[in-house]
Amino acid sequence: MALQRPRGTRDFGPKETAERQRVATQMRNTFRRFGFQEVQTPTFEELDLFTAKSGEGIVSELYDFTDKGGRHLTLRPELTAPTMRFYYNELTMEPKPLKLFYHANCFRYDRPQKGRYREFWQMGCELVGPDTPEAAAEVVALGVTLLRDTGLERLDVRIGHIGVLRGVLRHLGHPSADGRGGLMRAIDKWDEKAIRDGLAEGGVDASDIDWFLSLRDIRDLDGLSSALARAEEATEALTQLRDVVRLAEAFGVPPDIIQIDPMIARGLDYYTGIVFEMDAPALGAEKQLLGGGAYDLSSVFGGEPVATLGFGLGFDRTLVALDAEGKRPEARLGIDVYVAPIGDAPRERAVLLTTGLRRAGLIAEVDLMRRNPGKNLKAADTRGARYAILLGAREVESGQVGIKDLASGDQVDVPLDRVVEWLTERLVPGPAAEVPA
RNA sequence: GCCCGGGUAGUGUAGCCUGGUCAACAUAUGGGACUGUGGAUCCUCUGUGGCGGGUUCAAAUCCCGCCCCGGGCCCCA
């Protein structure tokens, strides 16, 4: 084959498409139960949208291009920036809280790995307006509910607050206390050497550096409070973090899966408060499923500052995690009924019958290949049909057709004008009818 | 960008180390026979070495480059 699909992209067959669709539908329903509404934005955007948000450095990982009008564009690498662009363009006067979610394909020029593709699907949401612990807690709970409702059992949730980290740095007199620059990245990756170097450059003495490094191992709120008693600069953020965790439990998050992680920095400049990440321990190197927090992109868009919370979720990776746990839904692609004419004479009658079945809402197929009865039964079986209808000249004559239950092999005669009724009674709701929309 | 392992009909495998007797087996699909239930059975067509180069009398087999897949590093807005 000379023509191949591009690296890092995938084709999805009927079965896989149905399975993905089913998980997606499940997730959409969860978003809706939390009061979020789905939006769509363009597949490509102005290049500047993403460089303004994330810096020039990201261009090497973008599918950017120049169109025939000389515009610098790029396929979207993520959906937060487009959604917030949409907000600042057209939605600023919508009633608050504004709850938006999305599910769409994104593109990054990366080295493909397990659960990581050049074209991938992201789900996510933005909650615009409220700056309260309830809002943050609801978003965290939404993320957890979303993943657990798919059937995923093992999930690690780590939650922190940028203000805690910044408060500590301010307490230590470090100039990166606004949360910018290489030190934050070193903390996010927890590169001890780089952290030591970074803190020392900022004039932090050795004993304080050791104290800072020791904070990472504290994974509960009480322990953190006593450890940070000396750093008043972090107190307010710590109080907020405590409120959010408490409320998240009230919003339905099982208490035992939350870990406090004061050192989540998300490697980004625009986070302002609560930050969180969720991992599937069943996965290897690419185990992070979801990440988000409270942020402010108003400077990028030049609009009024507005409190915003959101997260992005790797949809493909979530499916890999479900596979790893053996929880991926099995899609059934079967049809309800297969109509097999016997001989050429009743062919049109068979088509008319099929039309009637379809109008009644059944998934019905009729033989298109003029097979003999034996081959047709096999074909019906291959297509996963629950029933086959045998319709020959004799049946047309007597006004009865044979309906064969393909699982049991039992066959009964049913009057032609009662076929739809007979099948509908037995098939709705049947397994084949559960095939997701 | 780096390291490791792979790539044989649509699918699943065998052969590779030790070059020739090799392109095979299963299954699936298409066509046909059996003339109305044969979901069977039988016959049969099609289809294969990722791509390119090298070594050799001879390459699926050995060597090199590239492409793609998988695992890991880096990155991950």
Image: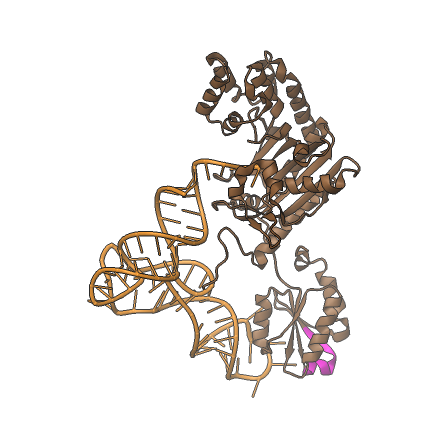
Chain colours: A brown, B orange
How far from the left and from the top, in percent, is residue A303? 72, 34
Q: Nearer the viewer, residue A138 or A430?
A: A138
Between A12 and A299, the one lying in front of the other is: A299
Left of B60 or right of it: where is A102? right
Quadrant of the rendering where the N terminus of chain A is positioned? bottom left
Q: Quadrant of residue A86?
A: top right
Regarding residue A121, the answer to whether it shows in the image is: yes
Magenta segment includes A397: yes
Q: Which residues are magenta?
A: A393-402
Residue A152 sits in which quadrant? top right
Asked if the stretch drawn in magenta spans residue A413, the answer is: no
Query: Is residue A27 at least partly visible in the picture?
Result: no
Residue A116 or residue A321, whichever sits in front = A116
Residue A243 in percent (x, y) is at: 68, 23
**A372 vs A87: above or below:** below
Q: Is residue A66 above or below residue A1?
A: above
| Figure quadrant of the C terminus of chain A | bottom right
Indicate whether A387 appears above or below B77: below
The main secondary structure of the magenta stretch is: helix
**Residue ranking furthest to the front:** A70
A101 with respect to A190 (left or right): right
- Residue at point 63% right, 80% down? A342
Coordinates of residue A269 in the picture (x, y in percent): 59, 30
**Percent x, y for residue A145?**
65, 38
Looking at the picture, tell me which residue is in the foreground, A354 or B36. Answer: A354
Q: Residue A433: which quarter of the image?
A: bottom right
What residue sits 48% from the left and 13% below the top?
A: A205
